[in-house]
Amino acid sequence: MEPTTFILFGATGDLAKRKIYPALYNLFVDNLLPQSFFLIGLGRREWSDETFQANVERSIREFSRREAEDPALLKPFLRLFRYCVLDAGRQEDYRKLLQMIEQREQELRLAPNRLFYLSVGPEFFETIAANIQESGLGSADGWKRLVIEKPFGHDLQSARDLNRKLNKAFAEHEIFRIDHYLGKPIVQKLEVLHQTDPILRELWTGRRIANVQITAGETVGVEERAGYYDHAGAVRDMFQNHMLQLLMMLAVHFPNDSADEMSRVKKRKVMEALRPLRKQDVVESVIRGQYTAGTIQGTPVTGYTSEPGIAQQSMNDTFIAAKLRIDDSFWDGVPFYIRTGKRMREKSTRIVIEFKDALMPSFAAKSGSKAPNLLVFEIGPKEGISLRFHKKDAPHTEEFEPVHVDLTANRGDVQEAYENLICDALRGDPRFFAHWDEVELSWVWVQPILEAFEDNLVPLRLYEAGSYGPAESDVLLAEDGYHWWFDTKTEQESNTKEGEPYAYHTNY
Ligand code: BG6
């Protein structure tokens, strides 16, 4: 890797503390930082270098996946960190910063390659980018990159405005838009799995697949983010970005030569083929939900509108489920069901591919089950890839038992999404970042949903905290003869509902 100066806006913030410093530490331990590297943390607080380093150390001790007990590693790592006070709107602060960086680059004889990381609220994105340009910070001889966190816009128009403004200071190839779901190890493995395993490649084709289900359930509620979340909702917070990126990664037909540019073109094609929704039709394929009081893992929790900072009459969505279609020859006739919500039964992000032609009809009639094969990607917090086959051992019963073959290659201590992404940004590899085309097309697709929610064309369905979302989201699949896989029900719920849907949980 080339020598790099890492300029971190928002160095005193929560994301830096929980994700960025621990990720950098683990990259350092794995020898994955450039040989010549230093980081300047920026924030409004009047910190000294020592205070900054002490805070970085604390965050590593608290959040790193690896213990930070070895002073021979920790000390040289902390020496890479310097601090500079900066008010994002004050131009002279940028000039001061430029001097500091130039001096350090000279001292260390570093090529002026600068990575600007915006770990700040979206209200600062444009100002910071403009000031980087005006101050000359972005005009050195080396390369420059902008790593930017979400949210990238609030709707289609604001995303376009933001992009236009960023483009005045950074070209598209210099912008690395973080979608941390793209950094998750299982998501990064999808392409390789598809390309290297002939059996899976054979199965992973639209004509063999009955449907695809993508779920990201969370047990947390709105937490301390009422101000942001009540205006974002699940549709902007999770759906427009993480969920649609998962869809693209799953649905893309990676070319054999999967050069960066080619992968991007292919991802864009998926978005272009996504059947558009008209505002008046959103109600038919999108479920909008909000949690009420309930119990999460034995603990009673309040409903959304009783959360601190949320208005009692808030109509914000904390859950969204949608049925999507990709109109290309590969995915023709295969529905994609996507759902995500807060305060759901379990924390789990998972993709399930349900295959067609389950048991041959004669067996199905006897066993009373369709028992399809499934390919399951557990993306987090549990990670794994498995394929479900059937076995029928007992000769005199008609029962089939699911057998799960674990396809996960490596186990144990896996790297975090932020490690993968920061490492890629340092290398200049854009593959697992969201290209503007993808972001724009996602907003184009989501815009009618935003408008339909805004105009209350889609009823707000309430769901109890600790459930799997509103019952209407089950109906979305039931209409097509399917059900969400792996929704574990309580005994009471199982007794009141009949049928196959929950039959396989204990085995999975
Ligand atoms: C963030 C959202 O992007 O992703 C949060 O803003 C959400 O609301 C989080 O909790 C979920 O990420 P993960 O990695 O825990 O699934």
Image (tube, rainbow, N blue to C red):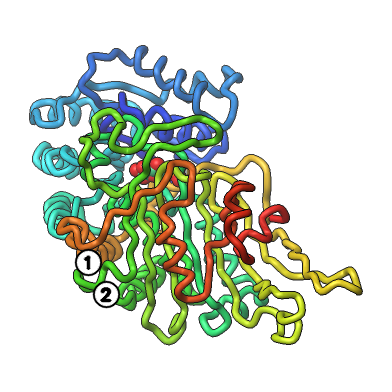
Q: Which label belongs to residue 299?
A: none
Q: Nearer the viewer, residue 315 or 441?
A: 315
Residue 314, x across and y down, in percent = 22, 42
Residue 417, x across and y down, in percent = 48, 45
Q: What secondary structure is found at the residue carrying circle 1?
A: helix
What residue does disc 2 label? 276
Q: Nearer the viewer, residue 79 or 441?
A: 441
Report whether 168 appears left or right of 445. left
What residue does disc 1 label? 444
Residue 39, x across and y down, in percent = 35, 30
Residue 145 visible in image: no
Quadrant of the image where one finds ligand 1: top left
Residue 183, x across and y down, in percent = 46, 50
For this orientation, the residue located farthest to the right is 395
Label 1: how many residues lie within 10 Å, few (<14), some (14-19) or many (20+)?
A: some
Image quarter where the C terminus lies is bottom right
Report whether 327 appears left or right of 423. left
Residue 471 visible in image: yes
Q: Quadrant of residue 106?
A: top left
As drawn, 482 above or below 414: below
Residue drawn at x 38%, y 52% is: 428
Residue drawn at x 15%, y 49% is: 169
The mark lying in front, picked from 1 and 2, is 2
Q: Which kind of residue does numbered mark 1 sit on?
A: Val
Q: What secondary structure is found at the residue carrying circle 2?
A: loop
Report whether 437 appears left or right of 463. left
Q: Which kind of residue does numbered mark 2 sit on?
A: Pro
CA gap, disc 1 to disc 2? 9 Å
Q: Earlier in the sequence, mark 1 or mark 2?
A: 2
Residue drawn at x 69%, y 66% is: 388
Q: Nearer the viewer, residue 162 or 77?
A: 162
Label pair 1/2, CB-CB below 8 angstroms: yes
